[in-house]
Image (tube, grey):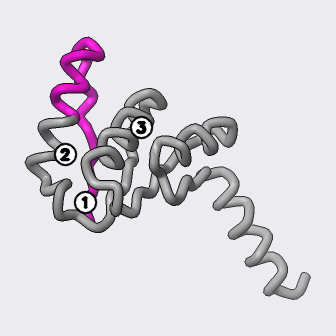
Amino acid sequence: MLTWRPSSDTSSSWETQEKDDGVLQRAGLATAKTVLVTTEEPNRKLTITLTAHTANPKLKIAVMDDNSHRVELLHRAGAGEVVIADELIARTLVDRLGKTSI
């Protein structure tokens, strides 16, 4: 599994793209089986997902996001799973409440 959290670099988008590509390649993207994308920047999530999927279409890519409106876009970029944290937390709370007697 390949997990990458980019630094809070303030480079231009072109430089950032080159850095993302280089980091992903050095991390073994060509032979990785899974990638978790956890950066907080929405456009960077999309770029990393698309870059990873293009370089290795067999990858299982999971992306954490906070906007349910971007799910379809991330799926189209190659993400197999998109996790919306608020939805995951809400489902977990409902499940736990359902298992306890009130």
In this picture, is 3 found above or below 73? below
Q: Quadrant of the N terminus?
A: bottom left
Task: Give the number of the disc on residue 2.
Answer: 1
Q: Quadrant of residue 101?
A: bottom right
Local packing at callout 2 (Cα closer than 10 Å; few below 14, some 14-19, many 20+) is: many
The reply to whether the C-beta atoms of the residues labelled 1 and 2 are less than 8 Å apart is: yes
* Mark positioned earlier in the residue sequence (1 or 2): 1
Residue occupying the point 13% across, 46% down: 25
Residue at point 19% right, 36% down? 21
| Residue 70: image location, x then y, percent | 61, 37
Q: How many marks?
A: 3
Q: Nearer the viewer, residue 21 or 40?
A: 21
- Residue 93 covered by magenta stretch: no
C-alpha distance separating marks 1 and 2: 9 Å
- Percent across and percent down for residue 53 are 35, 49
The residue pinned by badge 2 equals 24
Q: CA distance from mark 3 to mark 1?
A: 15 Å
The kind of residue on which mark 1 rests is: Leu
* SS category of the residue bearing label 3: helix
Which amino acid does the dot numbered 3 rest on? Answer: Lys
Task: Name the residue beneath numbered marker 3.
Answer: 45
> What amino acid does circle 2 point to?
Leu
Give neighbour class at mark 1: few <14, some 14-19, many 20+ (Cα, 10 Å): some
Farthest residue in the right direction?
A: 102
